[in-house]
Image (cartoon, rainbow, N blue to C red):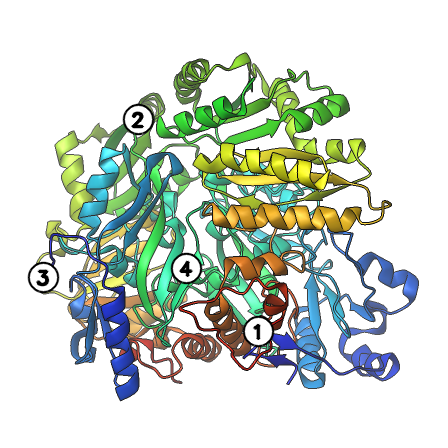
Amino acid sequence: MTTPTDQDLTQALREQLAEAVNARHAVSIHGSGSHGFMLGDFAEPHRLELAGHRGILDYQPTELTLKARAGTPLRVLREALAEGGQRLATDFPALSEDATLGGALAIGQTGSARPFHGAIRDAVLGVTLLGADGEVLRFGGQVMKNVAGYDVSRLLCGSRGSLGVMLDITLKVMPLPETSITLAFERDENSALRDMNHLAGQPLPLSAAIWLDGRLMLRLEGSAAGVEAAAQELLGERDGQRLEPAEADALWTGINRFSHPFFDGDTPLWRVIVPPATPKLELEAGHRVLTDWCGGLRWLRADALSEADFAHVRNAGGYIESFRGGRRITPAELMTALQRKLHRRVKKAFDPLNIFNPALSKFDD
Amino acid sequence: MSFDPATGEFDYPEWELQPVLADLEPLIGADNLLHRPSELIPYECDGLSAYRKTPKLVALPETVAQCQALVRYCREHDIPLIARGAGTGLAGGVLPVEQAIVMSLARFNRIRRIDPLQRIAVVEPGVRNLAVTEAAAEHGLYYAPDPSSQIACSIGGNVAENSGGVHSLKYGLTVNNVQGLKIIDGDGELLEIGGGECLDAPGYDLLALMHGSEGLLGVIVEITLKLTPKPQAAQVLLAAFDDLADAGRAVRDIISSGIIPAGLEMMDRLAIQAAEDFVHADYPLAEALLLCELDGSEAEIAAQMARVREILEHCNAHSVRVSRDDAERALLWAGRKAAFPAVGRISPDYYCMDGTIPRHALPEVLQRISRFSERYGLRVANVFHAGDGNLHPLILYDANLDGDLEKAEAFGSDILELCVDMGGTITGEHGVGVEKLGPMCHQFHGHELAQFYRIKAELDPAGILNPGKAIPSLHRCAELGAMHVHHGQLPHPELERF
């Protein structure tokens, strides 16, 4: 449950953490709970609740930066930014209306704009961290360029709450585009993959390129003049159509908030990362695919993937993660022994007592 | 122990040249080891030439296996090892420390491959920054980060320093343009981090951790770079102001109008004068100049340029000029790009600072810098990456005058502390090296430094990789009296403070 008022829970969180450290029991860090299925049986009985630790601490549109507490819902950030004529620098996925900034960063996955506007970690400028020893540590800052000290802020992105508690985060933000146009072209999967990668090498204001149900869809965003010129050029060279703005909105919101019918139902959802120009995946398992990230991310719906399917993706230079349902695949399984060694050491450098989300940061051989 | 993770202190035993040479010759090859005094001179400093020290030995390995052998040898023998690229850094990041071996990666200068369809280049660390852009040009692609030293600086060094450039507001820093690395860790093991051809990787973002770590956490031996489509066109606008505050307002208004310029640069009167005397770019003499570059399609540039002109007029700009072709664009940029050497002509020495501030603080920071300038009796020229708040004050001094260097350093230190106090940072893109170890104590308190030591101790357990750079020891901060006391507790009460 979230409370409507902004509040600073730093002191309470420090006390709860101190208790956990004294009792040597592990904790999991909990935002809105929208990714709870990722923890499954691994959820620790003791939780640090961050959803109440919320509020925008600093937002000056002319600085292109926004600082907010980790429990602030992304929805609240979007609304505040829109008032300033701005938005988040890339697509932050959200699984629920209450999905928090800290949760999005801890999961570290980026939506459709990834190949064009960068990963969410690229938008992070600074983080205040509650470390395992109960100290409040500040890394990075509120400015665009900063190379003082190791880049701990970005290291924390995608660390799944296993290195410490992010208390607040400073983000780089960007102006709202004047125009957004989505074009759709009938294509089979392989020609769509060739097309989208070819176009990504052209100077076009692309902000997303996906393939779904026989259609290649391109999102163009930026200045009205630039986007219109690009749309006309693309439609002049190829048979295609403009999506109505409402339809386009529904498409991109659906994909980046997992509300698109593709994500409906109980069939396991797999997240497949491959080099973007990898051709259509030839899998033994019956499946449906949504190709995002200009080919670099293939969402799969499939009941069970075979060993040959995993090998096929590995041979293409990629890997398969379980996102929801299906056989659980830990990051450690996807690493070499040396990579696991480095991960164990990073974990130890931040959390030597293994207090934070230990089940999500096991890198044993 | 050579590196003490509790305090950040280090100490290494002395070694004799001959036995070490005899050990290393079979591993690296006699021709790849430099030890005669004349051969060692080029390795005694980087771009911060006020600090020099001759290393005992320089290795120029030719293979990754030789690099690994050298890391392992140094680990076993407790010898500090400094990996070095082109040596263009401005913070003393590759200054030899006592007992160190310098490992130059100059021979790793091949572009392994360019994949135009997936928009990546796989390169060795000694490849020059500009060489990537040149090699990618035939595909309509380029490598976006463009530090001013891009003709000479190497990609490996760019990663180690997380280099920026004049286009970083729109196109990002090095960390935003690298997809994968091959590194040798402190144990001498070779491993891949980041996604490489992929846009994601399982586990922690070690790629981010390596960027800007100044060679303390690993040796970079291969880099997968993201390439960017070359914009259809680019145009630059120059405007003059009689009041610095007006120029600051213009920067603010351009950004809040929703335009992200490819480059947005400001110069103050002394920098303008020096540049004009040097390259004759036909800059108007004024209190401030603004250069605003827009890129994209012709239609987009035309629309945005009209908007920028309107904003500038509102902010009392005069002498507005817009480049009509690439030749004129190059000329308008020439003065800005020559600003550092131009200042070098009007003063025997200058000291280049690199703080970042929130943009809104600019007028106040410039006023305070001008007061410092009076107090120290040293002139200062300011060039400013206005788009991202990165300020480069150039402090003019004469090293031959007794005490002038010390005055310049104290002046610089005051500027950096001011940047931190205004909510900024002591280094935007040049790195800490040995130069800013003191100001680091102002930016970070003891617990944060301790976290940095723990990272170092885990990734380089023997503590041999580029010790004495980037992160100050607790002792150093205590001596400077700059230690931040947090909740009334010093992190290491056992240490003496003076």
**Circle 1 SS class:** loop
The crowd level at tag 4 (other Cα within 10 Å; few <14, some 14-19, many 20+) is: many
For the residue marked with disc 1, what is the amino acid? Asp
Q: Is residue A80 visible?
A: yes
Q: Give me the C-alpha separation between circle 1 and circle 4.
A: 21 Å
Residue situated in front as seen by the camera: B64 or B364: B364
Find the distance from the CA under tag 3 to the CA under tag 2. Answer: 44 Å
Q: Chain of mark 3?
A: A
Q: Do tags 1 and 3 sit on the same chain?
A: no
Q: Identify the residue under disc 2.
A: A231
The alpha-carbon separation of the residues under discs 1 and 2 comes to: 48 Å
Callout 3, which amino acid?
Met
> Of discs 1 and 4, which sits in the foreground?
4
Q: Which mark is residue A1?
A: 3
Q: Which of the marked residues, 4 or 3, is nearer the chain's N terminus?
A: 3
Quick one: A54 or B438, which is closer to the camera?
A: B438
Q: Is the C terminus of chain B in the top left, top right, bottom left or bottom right quadrant?
A: bottom right
Relative to B489, does residue A103 appear above or below in the rendering?
Answer: above
Q: Position of residue B281 (x, y in %)?
A: 69, 19
Q: Chain of mark 4?
A: A
- Choose mark 3 or mark 2, whichever is in front: 3
**Circle nearer the viewer, 1 or 3:** 3
Q: Nearer the viewer, residue B322 or B182?
A: B322
Q: Which numbered mark, 1 or 2, is in the foreground of this view?
A: 1
Q: Of callouts 4 and 2, which one flags the residue occurring earlier in the amino acid sequence?
A: 4
Residue B433 coordinates in the image, percent (x, y): 65, 59
Q: Position of residue A159 (x, y in %)?
A: 34, 67
In the picture, the quarter occupied by the N terminus of chain B is bottom right
Q: Is label 3 in contact with label 2 (beta carbons under 8 Å)?
A: no
Residue at the disc numbered 4: A153
| Residue annotated with mark 1 | B185
Q: Secondary structure at mark 3?
A: loop
